[in-house]
Image: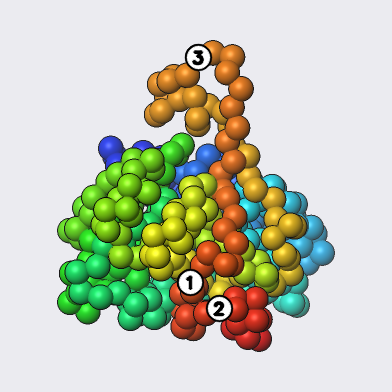
Amino acid sequence: MRMIDQTALPTRLTYVTYRTPEEVAQAIRTMVVRGAPAIGVAAAMGIALAAVRSKASRLPDLLKEMDASAALLRGTRPTAVNLFWGIDRVLNKAMNASSVRAAKEAAAAEVIAMADEDVEVNRSLGKEGAGLIRDGDTILTQCNAGALATVGYGTVLGVVRAAVEQGKLVKVLVPETRPALQGARLTAFELVHDRIACTLISDTAVGYMMSLGRVDRAIVGADRITRDGYVFNKIGTYQEAVLAKRHGIPFHSAAPKSTFDLARTHEQVTIEERGAEEVFEIRGKRIAPRGVPVANPAFDMTPPELVTSIITERGLVKTPLEENIARLMS
Ligand code: MRU
């Protein structure tokens, strides 16, 4: 499995190769690969690697090994539902096979299909979302929901790319997204690379930019959207949504069907708490005194009343979200 090392961006564009599920799990945990759809496919590849490397001669033994790798991968990051979706898709294929060889082939074929599908889904989602964007709009985002966060093209940046492909002038306002700086490092990297107009701002500038009339629409990604219409996404999303409401700015989440979790309501989701060093350091340099207590929730939760609509590959999910999410997934 070969992928970009996202921790090295934007300074270096390097690729890493992984051969075992343990290596893939470590890459997800340390955010070498991050973004809900990307970690879903990466985890699925981890399971497929477990299958193809296995020396088991009996199907139940192979499945047991795959289950052990699945447990390891499930323990990496708790919030993005795509991780669990990706793992289950590959496991289900293997469980329905009739021999070791068929299970290995099915696991490998499924993960390749998932990777191709992801790009197609993002292209459809991009087209659906681009319809919302007017020529000259400035779009505010959060974190990175681009090609890097998916297999390719992106969800939020897929919408932006599709609008640009339609000949619209679009500008993206990119909050840096402390503490891991996915906005400054990754979204800015993608947009500069594609020559799409963008301006980097500090997270604390969001409200003021809105008050100046410099935001036409906010579009953020999602790690999980529960059946009651709550959007879990990178920390900072919730305050963006509250500010958007205050200023009468439409606020959307862009997410594929694989990010919806019909089995849960918002109370049942675990928000990942990451290491304190992400907050007391910036790129390895300490910025806070030793001994200061730190809280580092990696995600937050935006209630449905702050969300104008959700952009999916099947079109817009409008309010009331709860009712229309059920319809989308049926
Ligand atoms: O911690 P991260 O970088 O994995 O968080 C990513 C996000 O919050 C994205 O907005 C989300 O996964 C959607 S990516 C298409």
Label 2 sits on residue: 319
- Disc 2 to disc 3, C-alpha distance: 46 Å
Residue contact at pointers 2 and 1, CB within 8 angstroms: yes
Q: Nearer the viewer, mark 1 or mark 3?
A: 1
Element marked by disc 3: loop
Quadrant of residue 261 within the rendered picture: bottom right
Residue contact at pointers 1 and 3, CB within 8 angstroms: no
Residue at the image point whose x is 51% and y is 67% from the top: 307
Element marked by disc 1: loop
Q: Position of residue 57 (x, y in %)?
A: 76, 62
Looking at the image, which residue sits at the far top?
290
Task: Return the residue nearer the eye: 188 or 13.
Answer: 188
The first of marks 2 and 1 along the sequence is: 1
Residue at the image point whose x is 57% and y is 67% from the top: 305
Residue at the image point whose x is 27% and y is 53% from the top: 212
- Disc 1 to disc 3, C-alpha distance: 41 Å
Q: Position of residue 264 (x, y in %)?
A: 73, 65
Q: Is residue 258 visible?
A: yes
Label 3 sits on residue: 289
